[in-house]
Image (cartoon, helix red, strand yellow):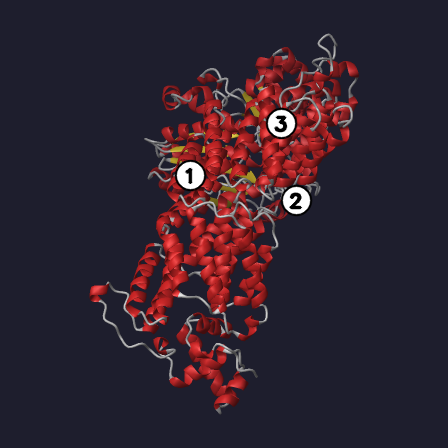
Amino acid sequence: MQQTSVSPVFVGRGSEITELTDALRRAGTGSPQAVLVGGEAGVGKTRLLEEFLERAAAQGAVTTLGSCLEVGAEGLPYAPLAAALRRLHRSFGPELEAAAAGSESHLALLLSELGEVDGEPNDEYSRARLFEHTARLFERLGAERTLVLAVEDLHWADRSTRELLAFLVRTLHRSRVLLVATYRTDDLHRRHPLRPFLAELERLRTVQRLELARFGRREVAAQLAGILGTAAPDRQLVDRIHRRSEGNPFFVEELATAFEDGFGAGLTDSLRDILLVRVEGLDEEAQRVVRIAAEGGSHVEHALLAAVLDDEEALIEALRVAVGANILRPDSEGEGYRFRHALVREAVSDDLLPGERHRINRKFALAVEAQPQLVPGDALAARLANYWYHAHDPARALPTALDAARAARRRNAFAEQLGMLERALELWDLVSEEVLAHTRPYDWAETYPPGSRDHDAADEDCDRIQLEDVLAEAVVAARRSGDRERGLSLAKRGIRLVDEVEHPVRAAWFRINRARMLGSLRRSGDEEEIAHAHRLVEHLPPSAVQAEVFALSANSAMLKTPGPEHVELAERAIRIAQEVGAHSVEVHARMTLGGLRYDVQGDAEGGLAELAGAVERARLLGVPDLLLRGINNLASMQRGLGRPEAAVRLAREGLEFADGNGLLRNIGAILTGNLVEALTDLGRVREATEVLAGYESTSLTGTHAEFLDRMRGDLAVLAGDLATAATMLAQARAANRIGQVQHSVPISRLAIRIAALGGRPLEARDELLAALVEDGRTGNESDVYPLLAEAAAVEADSRGLPQAEAGRPGALAAIAGAAAELRPRAPLHHGWARLLEAELARAEGTDTPREWAAAVEALRPTGLPYPLALALLRAGEAEVQAGRREAGAELLREAAELAAVRDDRPLGGQIAALAERAGLSLAPAERAAAVPAQAAGDSFNLTPRERDVLRLLARGWTNRQIAEELYISPKTASVHVSNILGKLAVGGRGEAAALAHRLRLFPDDLAPSGR
């Protein structure tokens, strides 16, 4: 038997071992860790992992290992987790079963030894529950001692495996778990799906990324010394091998082995030749076995090889030679073999003749069909499909691909389901009608009406799956896997394939699904697709698709420009859904109807009742996504009506329910945003900040990025951090849904506040006018009224500012016109309306204490600190200007208290500045002693000359104009301006001028004197 040894010593990697050991130590303290080890093929990732696992086990840790398998375009769903759990079960059976108690039916998807899989629906929510139960299992296993979970070859991981690993990394808390995963960096092309996965995880505090570099000459020399069994290998040999291998440890081994066998180191530059040298040195029988094993996959079972080769005695002898030559190695479970390096298997497979490769794969397929027990049950469908595909036998490959797709869906592996369905689409035209007649029937694609329904029960084709049925399954798989670009393409293909005249319902289904993809991708065309689908089904008999089209059409309008006709459409969708038994569609339509009753009909209580009823229906149906949609919408509606306490309760309920059902990734962002917004309304800003930070720490991804970014911006404004606020504004705008007022108006409001506080009133005006271009403001009074009131305040603060005068009448007219379109539906809306009226009067210079008192009176019952504090500030200012200083002081004190409760630094600063200028104390009345009112600018310690300069600067004059007016040099004027900017703590001339006007530092000099 031929025997060649790899290096018996572990070379280099001291810093990497130290990093892994440190991570193990941190994990042992109850802080879960993850280490991602990358490197090119052959650089020594596996050897490093083996060395570390040995050391970890020696320190008392429990270790387990699973490898991703290369089968087709991506690996088998959850393969490494299943292998790792199987290995744990063999070593720690009772402990693992105890940890899995209560979750057996879910975890059986990964480890069949735990029992039968439950019969729950196979959708994205059951997958989320699988993720939750898996995380719970590892938390329990790591409760008492450190657990090291190692995953090899992550570059071959299927999407489901990647998402499950990411879920574990994010959700494991306070458990002693260390996850170590290896991957090939040279396989990560620009569009490789592992790239965004690594980038996402790398941002987490508990994740560390190591990349193994190639060996230097010293390490190559040490490696060669171990391989050749000499203390000092020949220097020239070291130089040659180091140069030829470029420090890749695997290539070093290959070249050293070739040297020992007399081939020397001067091999061809072709990597394939280097990899095949050792294989070609085997005897013919061993080479034959290696070639066959290469087609079995990255891992092949011994029993399967025996079935393919027939002569087990000859097989064992050939395997012994291949293992001895370090080409194959037994797997960790002792049931099969894998190549020592995947590059060898690839090279062997690529070296096969086309007919030879087809024949070998056919043998594997036939063996698995004859004895399915030869491969794990969870891998059977995918393995069989891949063997027949590479055997170039479309008649067998297509049916098995369809079967594998169905199996993947039932395991919630939607990306793998999509891959198999696309393979079936590729093969469809290559098979005969007879083959198609014996494929599996249509599986499932939500409300889609399968082609089999076009045939009578007596028709022999009544159960036959049609091409458009496969497309429909693929469309849903694409959407659920998040590949909306592919889903868009598949839906378009379905539209082209289906005859609208002959099959209008099916055509409509494809169009509304294309609309969903377009909406998710933020692209135009979704409304046109929905309208087209509406025309197709409008006059047809009732169906689930018809109800879904009507419900989606009404919902789309609700988010944009709803009208009375959309209320009727939602009601019609409900009636049809009831008639055909489409219960989920009915609940969706009822939720939409609740929103429309509020937005269109102005019936706040009726909308609340409709929506609350839909929530209860969703509870009875047991459909988590429906229930969470209802809870979320109900929380949003309650907040819009000025009832943030109810919104807080609902949002917390939704978050708790989502967490318990593994759905935080799907809807956690919008629920968190609603909770943060409601807490901010209540003045509980610190709590809101903590909630937002807590969600950020989970690093859960999902939709509604613009919502959370906007809330981060709002909180930054309250803290006076305008730079962060501007950054968050830019991010929110980049992710904003086009045309949805519920998102765009609050973002515009944030932009106006940032511009105003930054002393840029013209920019704030531009933001307002751009926001008013959008339609659909009716029904969004809770967002639009504050936008208009704050924009009017900017116009009032800049009254008298020369550069702001030209467009002021148009801006004020636009604000008044927009306000006239609104319909107050709650006390909060009426309060904002009174505040807006007073700000418009202030902008014209005609406001009176009576108007501000009316705003305060209207807002006080709401109990919300922000609009009330703003009204109290303006009311106090009006009283002071009217000579009623004590009354003004009382109002300002109350305003200051509310601003402090809300941690509103900008507003608190305005209140304090006004009180200081007026010589009023903000201390309680019994301790307040009036101080003389200060001259303009005294509160900022401006000198008389600086006050003169500021007065002219506020008129918009240049340094040269100021110098001419005051008989000083332009340089001296520039020095005064710099001192003024510093004392006012502003960033520029425009901001200083805006501050002077806003604080009325020169009330008798508002009109420009013209230069």
Give the label on residue 275, or none. Answer: none
- Residue 924 lies, in percent from the top left, at 24, 63
Q: Position of residue 509 (x, y in %)?
A: 67, 29
Identity of the residue drawn at 41% across and 66% down: 848
| Above-or-below relation of 77 to 863 | above
Q: Look at the image and tell me in which quarter the N terminus lies.
A: top right
Q: Residue at x 61, y 43 (%)?
A: 186
Q: Which residue was labeled with disc 3?
A: 547
Query: Could you say which is closer to the camera, residue 174 or residue 731?
Result: 731
Q: Which kind of residue does numbered mark 2 sit on?
A: Arg
Identify the mark at residue 651; answer none if there is no mark: 1
CB atoms of marks 1 and 3 within 8 Å:
no
Disc number placed over residue 523 in the picture, else none: 2
Q: Residues within 10 Å of mark 1 (few under 14, many from 20)?
A: many
Viewport quadrant of the C terminus: bottom right
Q: Earlier in the sequence, mark 2 or mark 3?
A: 2
Please tell me in which quadrant of the rendered image residue 314 appears. top right
From the top left corner, tell me how far across and down residue 637 is, in percent.
Answer: 47, 41
